[in-house]
Image (cartoon, rainbow, N blue to C red):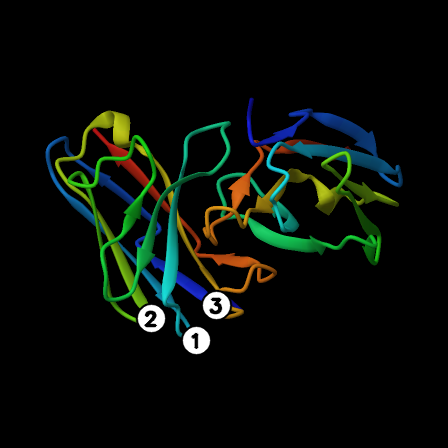
Amino acid sequence: GAVVSQHPSWVICKSGTSVKIECRSLDFQATTMFWYRQFPKQSLMLMATSNEGSKATYEQGVEKDKFLINHASLTLSTLTVTSAHPEDSSFYICSASFGGGSYNSPLHFGNGTRLTVT
Amino acid sequence: RKEVEQDPGPFNVPEGATVAFNCTYSNSASQSFFWYRQDCRKEPKLLMSVYSSGNEDGRFTAQLNRASQYISLLIRDSKLSDSATYLCVVRGMDTGRRALTFGSGTRLQVQP
């Protein structure tokens, strides 16, 4: 069964509005979660690393003021796309490591959120 | 140069065929390697980890060559349900990051 739950699965919003995406680890604690974005026919690109109780670490080129990440508990991280624009339309996927974050632990992914900004 | 490079395909093969995918990675400090499978418009799902000695899981065999920084996936007796995009994934250690770096994927289409 799923070990990472993501909500919503899809959302359509108007340009200028904000959208919040939730990512929950099920039955395990995730001190670190990762947010990825995937545009059509492209690979997953890491946006940011979400750390419980501290600030997220953003990848180069990702605006931290536009993509707000909050990781307030060991089982929940949220990504808020603020003032969304059509170019933000993408597939957003969160992930967490089940194996305590060791290097050999694969990541498990949420089911993704397909965001369409009109 | 991309950190993880894959032939995008598509690979169109008949049912029952054997097909091999290759992947190269640029960061010699990479420590962990995986193959993920992604179906259209879905999240990636772990197919298998890749170990230095090579490993097999049913019809799937993965190999790692650290000297050449090369990873492979072999699928035997292809099924229609194997049609998907296969993602080569590595995790580095030099930056302390535990995130994964994905290749752009190789698309497989198994035909009846």
Q: Residues within 10 Å of mark 1 (few under 14, many from 20)?
A: some
Frontmost of labels 2 and 3 is 2
Q: Chain of mark 3?
A: A
Amino acid at the residue labelled 1:
Phe
Amino acid at the residue labelled 3:
Val
Q: Chain of mark 2?
A: A
Q: How many marks?
A: 3
Q: Residues within 10 Å of mark 3 (few under 14, many from 20)?
A: some
Q: Residues within 10 Å of mark 2 (few under 14, many from 20)?
A: many
Q: CA distance from mark 1 to mark 2?
A: 7 Å
Who's the residue at 81% across and 30% down the image? B13
The residue identified by callout 2 is A75
Who's the residue at 49% across and 70% down the image? A100
Disc ID at residue A3: 3
* Secondary structure of the residue carrying numbered label 1: loop
Amino acid at the residue labelled 2:
Thr
Residue A56: x and y in percent read: 27, 52
Point out the tag, 2 or 3, that comes first from the N-terminus: 3
Who's the residue at 66% across and 31% down the image? B107
* Secondary structure of the residue carrying numbered label 2: loop
Left or right of B81, for residue A17: left
Disc ID at residue A28: 1
Residue B28: x and y in percent read: 64, 39
Q: Tell which of A23 and B80 is nearer to you.
A: A23
Point out the tag, 3 or 1, that comes first from the N-terminus: 3
Q: Is disc 3 in the same subunit as disc 1? A: yes
Task: Check whether the beta carbons of the residues at disc 3 and disc 1 lie within 8 A of each other.
Answer: yes
